Amino acid sequence: RDILMETFRLCTPMGQDDVVSLLDWAQSPFFPLAEGDFPYPSSYIPFSLNMGNVDLPAWPLQKACAELDKDIGVELIRNDERDVDYTIRYGSDNDSGLVLGIDWDNVKVVENGNGLRSATALKLLNATMAAVSVWFNVSKTAKCFDAVPAINEEEKEYLQSLRRANGIEPPSPKTPAQSCQEKLDGETVWTSLVCNENMNQIITAARGMGNDFYWPPTFPRKTTSFKDILAIDPDPLGEICADPDGVFGYPSREETYDSWATWLDDMYGGTRIESRSSILFSNGLLDPWSSAGVYKAGKYPPRGGKGEPVEMQNVTANGGIIALILDLGGHHLDLMFADDDGDPECATMAREIEDMYIGRWIMEWKEGRKSCAQ
């Protein structure tokens, strides 16, 4: 624990059970870093997530991964990737390296060696610290990090007893407005939006299932479909969207509450959109939300390797719905202000295609109105 506390510059001592909190903390920046992986400095994602009006650097995910991408002696043996069955060797025998066996959500020490004190393990910890600092120290002012719960319930009770012993009155109950503002400040407007609109968060809920680099898996082994997840966790927003006093204006948590927003599929048809037209979906492959994008049936995930900066797919047979795939696109990069010096080719091409199709659809609409008038 001392090695972890020192490497990650933790503000509070780690307890015996705080390793899981540290692991969650260390993995959490990579989603927003990928979202905000723009070719220029941008405050868009940090500001949206209450990090303040500060800029991430240009290509922040690549910057975060710079040290992690180096060959520091970690060998990953994929015994069965889909079953999250790995063997990980940290360093060579000369380094007295650590060897771990991963079996879904279990980890066992195969060889301990020097443990976290091996040269390779220390390099990996320092590379991870450099990576997460791109997000957690985006302001460049952090002296330490609150990666683990700082005050447990026993400590809270102890502090309250001290206040009572010293005649200090407990704080007055918060007004509904104060409670609402405090929640908004702590969780950002995104939480309010998700809770009020029943937004489907399947791609952020299902992690570590053999398709990404997160660990441990968030659902049991043999969970393979959306239907499986619905049966396991019918109300994933129950805790975060709880509003028993009706202060936040969230919908009541009745049996009819639809955390997974299945009503959207019922109302709009999901991907059963053959009868729709004049729609263009753009998907940036650097943006993790692109896994929830709309593509031609059987064409996700898009092709890998080198190819055109923009792949265009006809989602429907009549060509009325188009999907664009931007190879270097972050979160709706094509909708950001153009940057002639920084934009990758995919952004320029996507905007030209979007402009062409929107112009064509407007002309078709005008011609249709003219024909009706005649």
Image (cartoon, grey):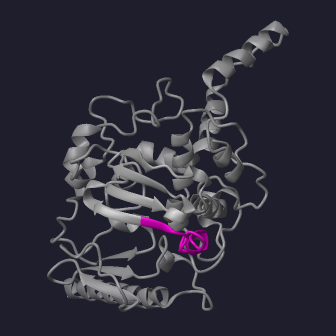
Residue, x 57% and y 45% (percent of image)? 22
The answer to which quarter of the image holds residue 59 is bottom right
Residue 158 relative to residue 85: left or right: right
Q: Nearer the viewer, residue 104 or 272?
A: 104
Q: Visible in this render: residue 200?
A: no
The image quadrant that residue 39 belongs to is: bottom right
Q: Main secondary structure of the magenta part?
A: loop
Question: In the rendered image, which quarter is residue 181 located in?
Answer: top right
- Residue at image x 43%, y 91%? 349
Q: Could you tell whether 190 is left or right of 226 in the image?
A: right
Viewer-side residue, 173 vs 163: 163
How far across and how far down the image is residue 279, in percent? 30, 75
Q: Is residue 293 above or below residue 49?
A: below
Q: Quadrant of the N terminus?
A: top right
169 relative to 43, above or below:
above
Spot occupied by residue 114 in the image (x, y as percentages of width and height): 57, 52
Q: Is residue 218 magenta?
A: no
- The region drawn magenta spans 61-75
Q: Nearer the viewer, residue 344 or 146?
A: 146
Residue 216 position in % (x across, y down): 40, 48
Q: Residue at x 33, y 68 (%)?
A: 293
Q: Is residue 319 above or below residue 284?
A: below
